[in-house]
Image: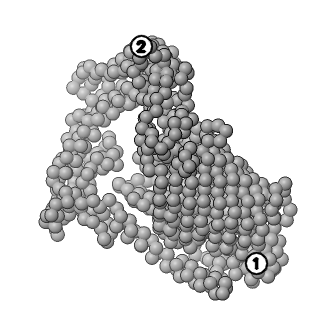
Amino acid sequence: MTECVERLMASCCSFVRARRWIGIVLVLLVVGRHADARPQGGSSDEQERPEVVDVRIEGARHVDEAVLRAGLETRASPWGPWRAKIYFDPSVFAEDLKRLEAVYAARGYPQAEIEGIVDRLDGNRVALRVIVREGAPVLAEDVVFVGFSVLSQESVDALRDAASLQPGRPVGTDVVQETTRQAITTLWNAGYAYANVEILGTEIAPDRVRVEVRAEPGLQTVFGSIDLAGHVSVEDAVIRRELTYLPGEVFRATPIEESQRRLAGLGLFDSVEIEVLEREPSVVGAPTRVRVTEGDHTQFTYSFGYGSDTQGYGEGGWRHLNFLGGARTAWLRGRWSWLDRGVEGVFVEPYVFTRGMSLILRGYAWHVDEAPYTAFSRGGRAGVQLDVGRSVLTATYLHEFESIRVAADAGSDPRAPLALLGLDVESGRQSGVRAALQIGLTRDASTEVGGMARGYRAALQLEQAGGWLPGAFNYVSVQGDGRYYQPLSGVVLAGWVRYGSIAPFGPPSDVPFSARYFLGGAQSLRGWGRFEVSPLAASGLPIGGQSFFTVSGELRVPVAGPVGTVVFADMGNAWEATWTLSSDLRADAGVGLRYASRLGLLRLDFASQLTTLEGLRLNSERRDRSWRIQFGIGHTF
């Protein structure tokens, strides 16, 4: 019976892999159906009004087109069947044009003129054009800071250099408000909780003003009493333990901002605001009020889609963000795809010993169906996580039972090599308890503004299994991961490098077959299928390596609205020996499309191999095609 079920599952998997384009088409249809297709107006004469099929913005040079589109309520009908048409409403379009003029005025272009043109097409349709005449900006002739003598000269110079208002740049309400905030923050960080800042402009020409940033610092002070407001089910202690300031400490803006970030990071609140209250004559220090608005602590989530690695997938989960009080989190999740399926439960105790340290308990049962092997694991993990700013340190103990079976292709291999890898000579199976200690360090110094990433992310993980720990497997492994993002004139240059090695304490069988390194697929070498790049057995079956290295580079180019393109190249390989790094690398290059849908960023890549991998066989078939099409959701890295 078991063999019949396995044959049936294998046939189903083959059927889906052979028809992967069906899944891609279905996802595109779903995207077309679920795009923002809210009809405008909603009156009964929709069928008589023309449908909006296109909205173009022309002449915008100093304000990003994405910012202007965000100010438009008028949209074009989405593409795809089952779409809800959007009909033209002249009054809404007229209000859109006024909003765009306000956008330009806020950025220092008060003379900007926005004109809307309606092009009538056949079939009761219209194409809209938004014509932008930006006009001359109002520039700052000079920016003078007055009343900041209570600060050191270094602080004043730093504020002057960082201020949004700069000589020779446009003066609009946006930069005035931002400069006011920057000046007040600087004074707050020096202890002046009741500082007042106003910005005055003196016109010296129709398009030139002299700007004065004038401060009234008041007196230095300390933090006073802390009042809490708005919470209902969340305990006072949960809020207070996330605050990074105490009464009596010197007043500064930085701990207020950090406290807001920490409270928002709990996920318990829809909004968090810390305000400085007016000081009463008999009160020492500057009192503050932490005002929160609680969100829904019980969340049900689900998602579905298609990827060239996972094929079709669906998953759902339940999460409670204040389980048993104390901001504890409980989470149950189930997932099914052609690649992996299983269930897991997670419990998080957010405050252990000190602020920022969490206890995380996890139990799971998971099945993975890779091309070279299948694996089933069940067990649990217990660990602590310490958050320090943008860095996270973790220590985790895992204890799980693993059952692994190599693909049927292994049957034509000489028995000795597979036996050395710990596989049963007759069945091709490997099983045992894996007990390991993992230490990890990650740092995320990246940000994303307007869809463009900037900065870097880095991670390092050390793992030891067996040795002084129980279990059937005995090894030590190291993996490093670095990512870097650099915007350059409207495009983003992104890079990704990874290296890892796993060293058995004894023979190669001390390493579980599923822990060996395989490359290829949508997340690594895109010119090959998933897990196709590794050392090969005599039959051509990938058997994984004990070291690997990959490096990828992408040039991400926005095209129009939610559409972008990518040019990329990948290099890497996996080697049999431990602690290996060789110039023997597989390489590919290609181009891709990106579409920012409501389901997430849809990714379609075409990659062509620049080097070859001879003798590769999977599912009894030769894999000598020199190109691949990869589809997924989210950036590759």
Q: Is residue 420 above or below residue 74?
A: below
- Residue at horizontal 51 percent and vertical 15 percent from the top: 152
Kind of element beneath mark 2: loop
- Front-most of residues 254 and 414: 254
Kind of element beneath mark 1: loop
- Front-most of residues 367 and 452: 367
- Front-most of residues 365 and 130: 365
Label 2 and label 1: CA atoms lie apart by 81 Å
- Residue at horizontal 73 percent and vertical 60 percent from the top: 399
Circle 2 residue: 281
Circle 1 residue: 428
- Residue at horizontal 30 percent and vertical 35 percent from the top: 107
Residue 154, position in %: x, y? 51, 18
N-terminal of the pair, mark 2 or mark 1, is: 2
Q: Is residue 258 above or below residue 38?
A: above
Q: On the image, which quarter does residue 13 sit in? A: bottom right
User: On the rendered image, what quadrant is the C terminus found in?
Assistant: bottom right
User: On the rendered image, what quadrant is the N terminus found in?
Assistant: bottom right
Residue 598, position in %: x, y? 39, 59
